[in-house]
Amino acid sequence: VALDASRDFGSGRETTLEYSVRIAASLVAISARSGRTIDLITAGDTSLHNADWQTAMDSVARLTVSGDNISVGMDSVASRAMVVIVPAVVTPQTAILAQLARQGRGFLVILEGFAPDEDPDKVISLFKTANLEVIHCSQGNIEAAVSRLSSSLFSTGALPEGVR
């Protein structure tokens, strides 16, 4: 899971950071039920590699807005299933995450309805050469987006069917 926590759009519990945390936590739980570890790629020193459920959940729970750049070895995601979570606004992290996404395969979750200057098509165009299925997550509809993402992970074989 790679996410952009460089800025937070929205207010209260309806923010891009809150949605990113909830989606990441859902993916941590799914990975744990399947007996797998998870990588969490964020800015600063909060990135994890092959984390177990407790470590990943602790890290997700502590995520805050960070202006730091994401830095990770691009080869570490080459053959892994990946979920990239970004707001529908181009931020300094968008290009870094797009470069990272080109190394893996998986899903791009676009968080929409949080900022007045959103341009989902522009964000998606930065990821155009990546092998990612786009999932739109509009404000107020996180459950539907997580359900679609979960179903897609199982249908593509990224996770075994018996752990839903």
Image: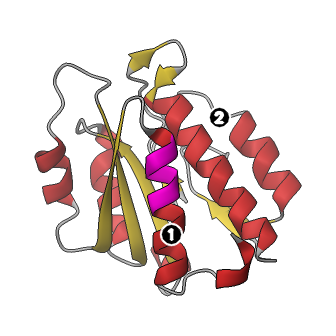
Relative to residue 66, is residue 43 depicted above or below? below
**Taking the image as drawn, is residue 66 in sight?**
no
- Image quadrant where residue 158 sits: bottom right
Q: Residue at x 65, y 65 (%)?
A: 39
- Image quadrant where residue 150 sits: bottom right
Question: Is 146 inside the magenta-drawn segment?
Answer: yes
Q: Name the mark nearer the viewer: 2 or 1.
A: 1
How many angstroms separate mark 2 from mark 1 (CA)?
26 Å
> Which of the pair 118/129 is nearer the observer?
118
Report the side of 126 relative to 156 (left or right). left
**Taking the image as drawn, is residue 81 in sight?**
yes
Q: Residue furthest right?
A: 54
Q: Residue at x 54, y 44 (%)?
A: 43
In the structure shown, which secondary structural element does the residue marked by tag 1 occupy? helix
Q: Which residue is mark 2?
A: 63
Question: Is 82 inside the magenta-drawn segment?
Answer: no
| Residue type for callout 2 | Leu
Q: Residue at x 65, y 34 (%)?
A: 63
Instruction: Tell me whether the residue at label 2 lies in contact with that at label 1, contact meaning CB atoms closer than 8 angstroms.
Output: no
Q: Which residue is mark 1?
A: 151
Q: Residue at x 38, y 22 (%)?
A: 9
Relative to residue 35, is residue 48 depicted above or below? above
| Residue type for callout 1 | Ser
In this picture, which residue range is highlighted in magenta? 143-148
Residue 3 in percent (x, y) is at 48, 49
Secondary structure mainly formed by the magenta segment: helix
